[in-house]
Image: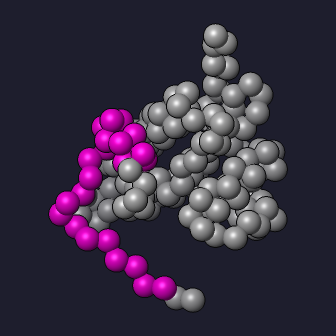
Amino acid sequence: MNEPAAVDVRRADLGDVDAIAPLFDAYRQFYECPPDLALAQDYLAARIGRAESIVFAAWSGGEPAGFTQLYPTFCSLEAGAILVLYDLYVAPEKRHGGIARALLALAAAFGRGQGAVRLELSTARTNVTAQRLYEASGWVRDDVYLHYSLSLR
């Protein structure tokens, strides 16, 4: 049996956008958005270029295998910075090799290094695979607060 390829997980920069944009596009399609590679490239380039988000990418066998995107914000109650882990995606053919765990670990290490008080995320109620991963990685489901949104479109 072949050993899994080594995984390199690091912060992405503008030079990585074209390589990871197809993963971002696939992530959006997973959540039923129409395919739009140009939009994915433009969005990632804008967020990274303006330092509005932190993107970590995983490379396996020299190919992009997954990514996560964090958005910095603040918590008034804890009077500190938090990071919202908004996106996490691993290419289907690269799953079950520890890539998502490596991305989550790097995000947590980054947050600690930045002095953030916590990381937050949300996922679809039906995405039980992701929920199992998060809980196995130490994340705790919030049963106190309800999440609401208001569409502005």
Q: Which residue is at 63% across, 62% downward?
A: 28
Residue positioned most to the top: 1
Q: Quadrant of residue 150?
A: bottom left
Percent x, y for residue 31?
56, 64
Please provide the residue range marked out in magenta: 129-151
- Residue lying at 37% horizontally and 54% vertically, measured from the top left: 120
- Of the 4 image quadrants, the one containing the C terminus is bottom right
Q: Quadrant of the N terminus?
A: top right
Toward the viewer: 153 or 31? Answer: 31
Left or right, 106 with reference to 58: left
Q: What secondary structure characterizes most of the magenta part?
A: loop
Q: Residue furthest bottom?
A: 153
Q: Position of residue 91 (x, y in %)?
A: 65, 42
Image-quadrant location for residue 38: bottom right
In this rendering, the answer to whether 141 lies above or below 77 is above
Magenta stretch: residue 140 in it?
Answer: yes
Q: Nearer the viewer, residue 148 or 128?
A: 128
- Provide residue 80's location: percent of width, then percent of height: 33, 56
Res 74 seen here: yes
Q: Is residue 40 left or right of residue 110?
A: right
Q: Residue at x 47, y 39 (%)?
A: 104
